[in-house]
């Protein structure tokens, strides 16, 4: 793995963190005050900053830093995350996303915007901080020495001053009078130093790298063996070192240990012979060292034999384990015991609880999954073929074979479902993206909008998710721009000036249904109707139901906004939305109530790899009609068929007339029209909400089929959506219902598609 | 024998960087993605030194360090904390929890290896 790969991982991770950030902020916006939510938000920004720092992405780091600082104020309850604060934070999250994208793909960000937000974030942090300034100071006080070790100032705070005279000791070896200064160091570790995994010998080793040095170990504090606590620190060292690294250099060696030892460093003056002479013979005892250290062993030894109960034994370990500060651990450990019933079981219990929270996941290359799905598709076909040939050849009904085959079929189905589930993903990321879109449009239009999402964890095939983002974006834009009224108007109508857009996902009968509802003014039918007349979409005297008028907005080039705004008027209308939904095998409809808003309902297949179809026969060919398109099937009676014009026919169904479409004729399977009475009519709903009756010769059955792209293997064929392989090994074509219906309106399919050859 | 380092960090980016850096420096690296996971693998990893982040879900660095220090077998293992721009208060809390030392982010391979060598024999 090289740096570029890690960078790629970083950006992937950024995406996840940004999603986390946004959803956390939205939760806070909804009044969630769970500290864990704040923590998660903080962590997301923190993590982005950390990674960005490692890659030298300075813009990202500096913005994330300011953001983080402000979030830290929220985290420490210095800043109340009210709506105004969150508004700034959500915008900051957007800018952070932009900066991340810019760092990955190049390109620039709106610098003015990010600078503005930095100012706003800083204002939030500073404004609140100065008000609450006293609290943090007071809290910081009892904590010892929160100063980086490198700063000499630490001398004053790093340890308690000990009345100690340097004159009492020095060193035997006085270095030659090079220009390099000599320092005398008294280093007396406390037991905490060892408890934290530091090691005096390693520190001395490091120290020796700084220059010429001599060490004297003071063992005077060592008690008799029987009084000795193996976890106590009894030794002290006197060191004399000649180094050009200065006092700071020496201190940096003790950087990690500084709090846990007594450390005195003194530069030796060039001519200090007197002190040197005096020191060697002088015993250490008279010096009032930190006597509490010496006292401690007694206390500990008294209490040590006591831990016979298993809990505390596990907690402290046995006495023979070296270098662990039992004395120091006493207090926190007992606290811990109070908090957790069995300290030893603590981590295990925690892990059990957490594993329920986050199931382990793996990341797999999408290609591999697709390959698997493809193979399973082949398996399904193969299994169907096998079943069919066994049935054909086995007239005796050998039950063991049949039973085996049944089981195989069931297994195959299950494998197929499981494999499909691998590709299924929650719609959450797409929904999350929408909240940003809403924010941006709300800003641009000066409307106040609240996006409510439901069913974010509803799962659907990844391809569907990927392709959903674009139409959904347009719809959201439309909903805010056209659907919701301006605040004044809402207020005048007695509504909450803040509009609500509700985005919902749910599973319904094997499909995913996504609803986008706004509480705006609803479709202005008068306006839509007028516009349709102006654009020659309908005749001026056409008699249209409300539903039909509403559906007019799905026609190409239709926009009811008086002037094309730069938000929804980007040449993309609802017709494009509708087409992209249909391309996914979905349907979209609208229901609107004046003054109360509109609801767009999209129904999409869960997967694009299989399809529930009705297998039909048309002029000797086997075709598959997507089940989702079929409203009902019926056997026409002669009396219900009415002819008009040259070749047009209508069928009357429950007192309404519906055009009859002869599929065989449209696809050029036959030259003359079939007799409707001998066939079956499939009532289908097509583009624009109209119904048509498709004439086929017979229905063979209903089946789940694996979709095989025709375009990938052959070329696009008008009227045909795709192909599949049936159980008997034959290729069947999947009907493109909308294209066939459109063709029946006179825009006939191209002549060259004589499909008899293909079937 | 290779020295074993247990790294605990919730960021995949940092985990990978640690992995590459430590492996290049001749360490054997075991990784965990948060404090809970860190404590879970502690026994198996049997590390000579631990490098941990502070801000992590489930169990943060402070909790993790305390957990290690409570483990009778591993309580003396050196633990280095990854911190950002020498946040004094955090450093201090980590120290109180039982951290041996710290490495200041942004991540710098040389500093990391230096710090590890400082606390291991």
Image (cartoon, coloured by chain):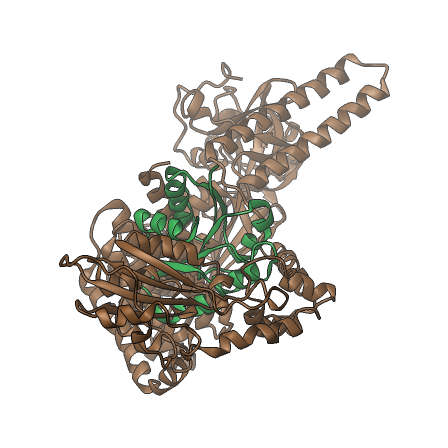
Chain colours: A brown, B green
Please provide percent x and percent y for residue A303: 66, 73
Residue A446 is left or right of residue A376, and the answer is left
Of the 4 image quadrants, the one containing the N terminus of chain A is top left
Of the 4 image quadrants, the one containing the C terminus of chain A is top right
Please provide percent x and percent y for residue A197: 48, 58
Please provide percent x and percent y for residue B66: 54, 64
Residue A178 is left or right of residue A301, and the answer is left
Count of labels in the image? 0
Q: Nearer the viewer, residue A274 or A316?
A: A274
Residue A572 is left or right of residue B46, and the answer is left
In terms of image quadrants, where is residue A390? Answer: top right
Please provide percent x and percent y for residue B119: 42, 53
Q: Nearer the viewer, residue A73 or A160?
A: A160
Residue A737 position (above or below residue A543): above
In terms of image quadrants, where is residue A281? Answer: bottom left
Q: Nearer the viewer, residue A152 or A270?
A: A270
Q: Residue at x 73, y 26 (%)?
A: A408
Q: Residue at x 33, y 44 (%)?
A: A7
Q: Residue at x 40, y 21 (%)?
A: A751
**Can residue A433 be seen at all in this image of the molecule?**
no
Residue A130 position (above or below residue B28): below
In terms of image quadrants, where is residue A544? Answer: bottom left
**Can residue B17 be seen at all in this image of the molecule?**
yes
Residue A368 position (above or below residue A620): below
Residue at far left of view: A179
């Amino acid at each position: 793995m090289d740096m570029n790969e890690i960078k790629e991982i970083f950006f992937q991770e950024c995406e996840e963190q940004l999603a986390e950030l946004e959803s956390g902020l939205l939760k806070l916006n909804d009044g969630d005050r769970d500290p864990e939510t704040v923590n998660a938000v903080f962590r997301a920004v923190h993590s982005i900053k950390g990674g960005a720092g490692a890659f030298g992405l300075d813009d990202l780091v500096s913005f994330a830093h300011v953001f983080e600082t402000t979030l830290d104020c929220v985290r420490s309850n210095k800043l109340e995350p009210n709506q105004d604060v969150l508004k700034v934070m959500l915008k900051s999250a957007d800018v952070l996303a932009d900066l991340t994208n810019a760092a990955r793909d190049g390109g620039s960000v709106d610098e003015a915007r990010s600078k503005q937000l930095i100012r706003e974030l800083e204002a939030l942090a500073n404004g609140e901080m100065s008000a609450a300034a006293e609290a943090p100071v007071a809290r910081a006080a009892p904590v010892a020495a929160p100063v980086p070790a490198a700063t000499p100032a630490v001398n004053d705070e790093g340890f308690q001053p000990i009345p100690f005279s340097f004159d009492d000791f020095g060193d035997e070896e006085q270095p030659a009078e090079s220009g390099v200064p000599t320092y005398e160091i008294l280093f007396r570790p406390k037991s905490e130093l060892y408890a934290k995994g530091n090691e005096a010998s390693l520190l001395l080793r490091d120290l020796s790298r700084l220059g010429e040095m001599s060490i004297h170990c003071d063992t005077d504090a060592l008690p008799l063996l029987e009084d000795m606590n193996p976890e106590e620190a009894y030794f002290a060292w006197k060191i004399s070192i000649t180094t050009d690294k200065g006092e700071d250099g020496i201190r940096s060696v003790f950087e990690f240990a500084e709090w846990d030892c007594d450390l005195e460093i003194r530069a030796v003056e060039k001519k200090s012979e007197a002190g040197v002479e005096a020191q060697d013979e002088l015993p250490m005892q008279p010096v009032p060292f930190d006597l509490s250290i010496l006292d401690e062993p007694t206390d500990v030894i008294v209490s040590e034999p006591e831990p016979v109960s298993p809990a505390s034994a596990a907690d402290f370990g046995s006495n023979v384990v070296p270098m662990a500060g039992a004395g120091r651990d006493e207090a926190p450990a007992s606290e811990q015991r109070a908090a957790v019933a069995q300290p030893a079981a603590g981590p295990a219990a925690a892990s059990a609880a957490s594993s329920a929270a986050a199931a382990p996941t793996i990341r797999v290359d999408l290609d591999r999954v697709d390959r698997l799905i493809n193979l399973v598709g082949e398996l399904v076909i193969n299994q169907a073929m096998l079943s069919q040939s066994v049935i054909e050849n086995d007239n005796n009904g050998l039950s063991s074979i049949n039973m085996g085959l049944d089981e195989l079929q069931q297994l195959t189905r299950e494998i197929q479902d499981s494999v499909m589930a691998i590709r299924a993903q929650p719609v959450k990321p797409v929904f999350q993206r929408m909240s940003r879109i809403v924010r941006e449009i709300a800003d641009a239009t000066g409307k106040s909008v609240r996006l409510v999402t439901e069913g974010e964890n509803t799962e659907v095939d990844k391809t569907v998710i990927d392709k959903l983002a674009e139409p959904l974006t347009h719809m959201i834009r439309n909903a805010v721009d056209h659907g919701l009224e301006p605040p004044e108007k809402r207020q005048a109508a007695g509504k909450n000036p803040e509009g609500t857009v509700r985005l919902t996902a749910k599973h319904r009968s094997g499909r995913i249904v996504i609803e986008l509802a706004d509480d705006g003014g609803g479709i202005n039918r008068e306006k839509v109707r007028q516009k349709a007349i102006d654009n020659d979409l309908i005749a001026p005297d056409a008699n249209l139901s409300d539903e039909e008028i509403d559906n007019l907005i799905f026609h190409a080039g239709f926009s009811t906004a008086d002037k094309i705004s730069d938000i929804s008027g980007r040449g993309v209308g609802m017709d494009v939305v509708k087409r992209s939904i249909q391309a996914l095998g979905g349907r979209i409809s609208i229901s609107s109530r004046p003054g109360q808003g509109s609801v767009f309902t999209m129904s999409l297949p869960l997967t694009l790899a299989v399809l529930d179809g009705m297998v039909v026969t048309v002029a000797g060919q086997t075709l598959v009609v997507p089940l989702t398109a079929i409203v009902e099937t019926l056997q026409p009676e002669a009396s219900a068929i009415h002819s008009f014009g040259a070749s047009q026919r209508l069928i009357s169904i429950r007192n309404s007339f519906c055009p009859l479409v002869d599929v065989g004729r449209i696809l050029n399977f036959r030259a003359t029209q079939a007799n409707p009475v001998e066939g079956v009519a499939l009532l289908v709903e097509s583009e624009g909400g109209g119904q048509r009756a498709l004439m086929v010769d017979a229905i063979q059955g209903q089946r789940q089929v694996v979709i095989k792209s025709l375009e990938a293997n052959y070329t696009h064929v008008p009227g045909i959506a795709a192909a599949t392989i049936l159980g008997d090994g034959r290729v069947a074509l999947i009907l493109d219902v909308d294209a066939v219906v459109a063709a029946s309106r006179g825009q006939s399919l191209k002549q060259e598609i004589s499909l008899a050859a293909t079937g | 024998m290779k020295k074993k380092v247990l790294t605990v960090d919730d960021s995949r980016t940092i985990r990978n960087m640690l992995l590459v850096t430590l492996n290049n420096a001749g360490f054997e690296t075991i990784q965990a993605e948060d404090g809970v996971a860190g404590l879970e693998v502690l026994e198996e990893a049997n590390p000579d030194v631990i490098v941990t982040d502070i801000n992590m879900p489930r169990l943060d660095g402070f909790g993790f360090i305390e957990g290690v220090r409570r483990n009778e077998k591993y309580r003396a293992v050196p633990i280095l904390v990854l911190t950002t721009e020498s946040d004094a208060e955090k450093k201090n809390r980590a120290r109180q929890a039982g951290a041996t030392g710290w490495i200041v982010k942004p991540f710098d391979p040389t500093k990391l290896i230096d710090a590890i060598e400082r606390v291991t024999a």
